[in-house]
Amino acid sequence: MRCYGFQNEVKSYLNRLERENGFRVSAVAAKAINDRVESLKKSRVWSQYSLGFNDKDGDAYLTRANVTDLIGRSEVLWFARGMKALGLYQNMVAWPMRNYQNAGTGSTVYSLGGLGIYNGTSYNNPSWGTAGISFTGTQYITLTPSIFNNWSAGTLSAVYNRGATNGTYQTIIGDSGSKFELSYFGDTLRGCVNNKNSATFTDTNLNKFNNIFSTFSVAEDIQKFYFNTTNQGTTIPSGTTGTTTNKTIGGTFATSLSFPFTGSVGFLFGLQKYLSADSVSVVNKLYKQTLGNGLGLS
């Protein structure tokens, strides 16, 4: 492909795609990628996070998930590179759920990250879309049980669009009701770890948000919430939770009705990796510019 006036990184990447992968790159797609790179460079995000198109782990994910959309492929590679620059990739497993960044069809939700390959499996056919996977109370993604067990420190994050209808319970991501989860009870965003129910944040305007980036961090017996990038404070856990031990994105207790929501991505940072406020902020910024582009995150 002739890319006159394009960024050198873009020209090299597009030529490699056509040469090694047999991709036919249209002029429109090529320009869209080049425009994104120019914007990232202008905003200094490109240099701040050492972004680029060459990443073997990102390439391996794209092959597993059979991602063919050129923008989706680029965003995955940029995000993987950025998380490595932050020193967080090896402690992360993520589930990108926007259709053009993952398989986009079928029941397997492929995982990305250095903690290992932990693909999710969707139940009852939640629908893939450009903003993510849309769930109702009878639809969810099951996750590998072992990665949520025996936590004393770690972080869960998710980006989602919550529907307007309130329900009694919804697991955003985690082990519903037991070891480690980020969830909703009605209008209350809640976290729990090691059977301790705590760290709640209630906001009557939750349904007015478009897309939300929520984070629940645990260090020993201290728990913190971040709503988008705003630190909502520290709480000490107390009490106990239910006995359900499903590991899901979007799950519920069997007898509960839940609100509909669309999940764009789920994150687990493990191996005792507790994200500080500064880390939450830079991950949020990287995500907004890469995998979360166009979601209107604050």
Image: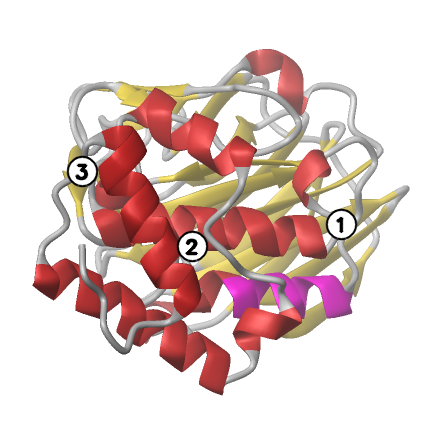
Secondary structure beneath dot 3 equals: loop
In this view, 73 is above or below 35:
above
Residue occupied by mark 2: 159
User: Residue at 10% across / 64% down in the picture?
Assistant: 28
Asked if residue 229 shows in the view, the reply is no
In space, the residues marked 2 and 3 are separated at their CA atoms by 31 Å
User: Residue at 57% across / 14% down in the picture?
Assistant: 145
Tell which circle, 1 or 3, labels the residue nearer the N-terminal end.
3
Indicate the amino acid at tag 3. Phe
Secondary structure beneath dot 2 equals: strand
Magenta region: which residues? 277-286
In this view, 274 is above or below 23:
below
Residue occupied by mark 3: 23
Indicate the amino acid at tag 1. Gly
Left or right of 274, for residue 199? left
The mark lying in front, picked from 1 and 3, is 3
Q: Position of residue 42 (x, y in %)?
A: 47, 86
Residue nearest the observer in this picture, 169 or 292: 292
User: Residue at 51% across / 21% down in the picture?
Assistant: 247
Tell which circle, 1 or 2, labels the residue nearer the N-terminal end.
1
Q: Position of residue 258 (x, y in %)?
A: 29, 40
**Which class describes the residues within 10 Å of circle 2: few (<14), some (14-19), or many (20+)?**
many
In space, the residues marked 1 and 2 are separated at their CA atoms by 21 Å
Tell which circle, 2 or 3, labels the residue nearer the N-terminal end.
3
Left or right of 26, for residue 32? right
Residue occupied by mark 1: 87
Left or right of 88, for residue 71? left
Tags 2 and 3 touching, CB below 8 Å: no
- Is residue 159 highlighted in magenta? no
Residue 204, by quadrant, is bottom left
